[in-house]
Image: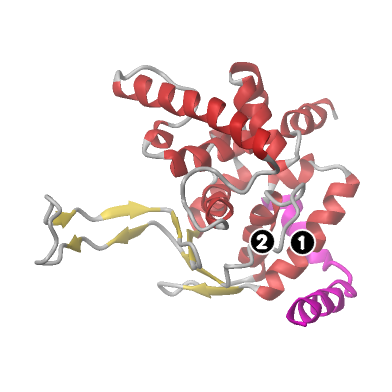
Amino acid sequence: MFRWIADHRRKKILEKDFPAEWRLTLQKHVLHYLFLNDEERIHLEQLVQVFAEEKIFTGCNGLEVTDEIRVVISAEACMLLLGLPHDLYRNLHTIFVYPSTVVVPEARQSMFSTAPFLVRSEVAISGQAFKRGPVILVWDAVKKGARHPENGHNVVYHEFSHILDMLDGHADGVPALHDKKSYESWSRVCSREFNSLIEKSQKGKPTFLDPYGATNEAEFFAVATEYFFDKPLKMKKNHKELYDILAGFYNQDTAAREKNHRLK
């Protein structure tokens, strides 16, 4: 019953034309939108229409949520879903958007805790995701990532890949895959790449992926996702098995997409 209501509501949303000003926003502010073929653009626009309508965007620290903010964040979040069976991040309802870097307050330990550290230092973040929401995003970082994928840093891709990872209840760097063989391949390839990143990072050697991906398996998946969308040609050239694993999960050939865009 509730699924029918959702589907009916979404059909009503999609009866409206995609706003022309939203399309201009995508063309101007989301470079990867320009990489898509006509079919993919139509699909993305449909996802954006529903996502922007269903999710609650809340501005923080005086930020006013504009259509530009809603559309850019929606488009980047939905870019991950273009090839996936999905329910638009079903466990997520609210997105908090800050104008600039957020500093997470220090966490004081309970007097009953047995952990060795008493205080966690304040940490500046550009995004954060929780299993059932919210997602926290910094607008300055969102804008930069959307316009400059060549940097390999996209806070929306990063945080929403965490949401995909946690749909099965665990933030372990292994999203819900298609079959047993997929899990076996994922474990083999990602374990090797993750351990290699740890080893090189500890020795101060240069790495293709951001060393932050060596933090844990969940961060490895999030960082790898950023690079799969932002630097796919280099990933396919230098880490082909990792690229193939991600292409199989997302059901997108981002390297071919970027190559075709360059040839235009």
The reply to whether callout 1 and callout 2 are in contact (CB within 8 Å) is yes
Q: Which residue is mark 2?
A: 74
- Magenta segment, which residues? 1-29
Which of the two discs, 1 and 2, labels the residue nearer the N terminus? 1
* Disc 2 crowd, CA 10 A, few/some/many (<14, 14-19, 20+): many
Report the side of 111 relative to 69 (left or right). left
* Disc 1 crowd, CA 10 A, few/some/many (<14, 14-19, 20+): many
Q: Provide residue 89's location: percent of width, then percent of height.
A: 63, 62
> Between tags 1 and 2, which lies in front?
1
Q: Which residue is painted at 49% across and 55% down in the image? A: 140
Q: Which residue is mark 1?
A: 47
Q: Is label 1 in a helix, a strand or a loop? A: helix
Q: Tell me the amino acid under the disc marked 1.
A: Leu
Report the number of discs. 2
User: Is 184 placed above or below 226 here?
Assistant: above
Q: Tell me the amino acid under the disc marked 2.
A: Ser
Q: Provide residue 259's location: percent of width, then percent of height.
A: 77, 26
Q: Is residue 157 magenta?
A: no
**Quadrant the C terminus occupies:** top right
